[in-house]
Image (cartoon, rainbow, N blue to C red):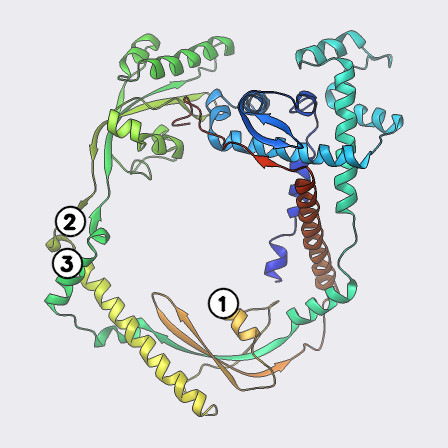
Amino acid sequence: MFDIVRKHQKILQLVLMLFIVPSFAMFGISSYSSFMDKETDLVKVNGKAISEQEVDNAAKRQAERVGGNVQIAQSLQFRQAILNELLQQRILGFAVSNLRLQVGKEELVKSLQNIPQIRALYKPDGSFDDARFKQLLAGNGMNEEQFYAGQAFDLKIGQLVNSVARTELASPKLSEIVSTLYETERQVQTLQFDAKSYLSKVNPSQEELQAFYSANAKLFESPEYIDVEYIVLKADPKEDAKVFNEKADQFANLTYDQADSLKPAADKLKLNIQSQKGMTRSGPAGVSRDHPLANPKVAQALFGDDAVKNKRNIETVQTSPGVFVSARVVVFHPAQTLPFADVAAEVRRQVSQRAAEKMAVAAATERYASLEKDPKNAGGFASPIWVSRNKPANLLGGALDDVMSVNPDKLPAYISVANPGTGTTIYRVDQVRQPSTTDAKVHQAQAQQIQALAAQSEFAGFMAYWRDSAKVKVINPLKATSNSAGS
């Protein structure tokens, strides 16, 4: 029901979550005040640069906050997400500054009391532990002035974002029109031209089969695969967490620094070197989901150039809490075209399927042409059903769009829709009606969804305006770090 609108129901909510990032929890006031860094510039906002070092520092802080490891903080995808957030914060900061927004003292105090770390500083007698407060700030690299400024800045951004989000945009009349369109019903009949119905008429020659095999060799390749060896470090519940963390660091360092073999790390940490043959890009066959090599990051790293060509250890991957894995390729088996004799049955199946589909499409084309000449000759169609966008029955995607777009003044109407791989379906539309009753709850939900979409569009326009006003300029693309391979 109302598929297009429903998919975007919470988009604005997610956008707001991205933009409103409390300074105490993530970046700190340095994200707002250190605009004059002169290291490698990535982006400039109002002439002030975001440097690669700033992105790396913010990525490290955020990874630590969510319990991630160094590899996560160094990954290009994670750092790019951090850069995007920093850029969005800078643009909003520019807007806040230009609009001269203010935050009242009462509002600031209330916001501070909502921070769990601050609430925890109140003693049983109601007094505030100022010494612990300063110690907490120092641990986050801030003094009191910076912290209060950061909180005030966050509140200003919140004011700005919420004011745009609360803008009333979509009119009730528009919502009602859309709801009416989604309720409109059409009576539809279908006529299927399915390839499988024509398979009995297909009999490819040996020459046709051989020609198809030669022209489509890629379809009949055995996948590339590797034989690997790997080591796993698992936390012992009885072991002190600090001791295990030290072992995990040793594990990562040894497998990285002595990348030609897993033996140094295995010997040092008393681990068994295990082996696995026949591993493909989708992972090893016949293993459980929690198997160390079943982790997608491990498989991706093992099929990377450095692992395949140079036979170097992949960087350590944390596959689950307390479980670290490193591995290396022992033998790489490239993809190979299978002999015709081994795939003859599959070649015949594919050739026959394609020929049958062509016959089905040709028959549908011929029938559609005859229906256009004589619309009343509707023999062979299935029993009629009523469909709408709210109740599409088995109509999906383009077929539903085509049926619902039929001009009601020119009925009966016929639509031919291709079904790649299977054939063609012809739809006959002969009546249009409005339902006798409507669902008030559905109308209300659709109105809310339309409002959310309108707000999303308004917010995107708002950000685009301030991005242009701040003269955002991309200086250099963010590049992968030298230590991010395999992470």
Q: Are marks 2 and 1 in contact (CB under 8 Å)?
A: no
Can you say whether 121 is above or below 35 in the image? above
Disc 2 to disc 1, C-alpha distance: 38 Å
Residue 55's label in the rendered image is none
Left/right placement of residue 346 relative to residue 447 reads: left
| Residue designated by label 2 | 338
Left/right placement of residue 275 relative to residue 175 reads: left
Q: Residue 284 in the image: x percent, y percent?
A: 30, 35
Q: Secondary structure at mark 2?
A: loop
Q: Secondary structure at mark 3?
A: helix
Q: Secondary structure at mark 1?
A: helix
Left/right placement of residue 404 relative to residue 125 reads: left
Q: Counting residues from the N terminus, which is met first, the one under dot 2 or under dot 1?
A: 2
Residue at point 77%, 32% (across, down):
97
Q: Please tell me how crowded label 1 is: few (under 14), some (14-19), or many (20+) other residues with Cα within 10 Å.
A: few
Can you say whether 410 is above or below 346 in the image? below
Q: Counting residues from the N terminus, which is met first, the one under dot 3 or under dot 2?
A: 2
- Residue 83 visible (yes or no): yes
Q: Which residue occupies the foreground of this view, 135 or 470?
A: 470
Q: Which residue occupies the foreground of this view, 264 or 71?
A: 71
Q: Residue 26 in the image: x percent, y percent?
A: 65, 25
| Residue designated by label 1 | 398
Image-quadrant location for residue 24: top right
User: Looking at numbered disc 1 in the image, what kind of residue is underneath it?
Assistant: Gly
| Residue designated by label 3 | 344
- Residue 396 visible (yes or no): no
Residue at point 39%, 21% (across, down):
316
User: Looking at numbered disc 3 in the image, what kind of residue is underneath it?
Assistant: Ala
User: Looking at numbered disc 2 in the image, what kind of residue is underneath it?
Assistant: Leu
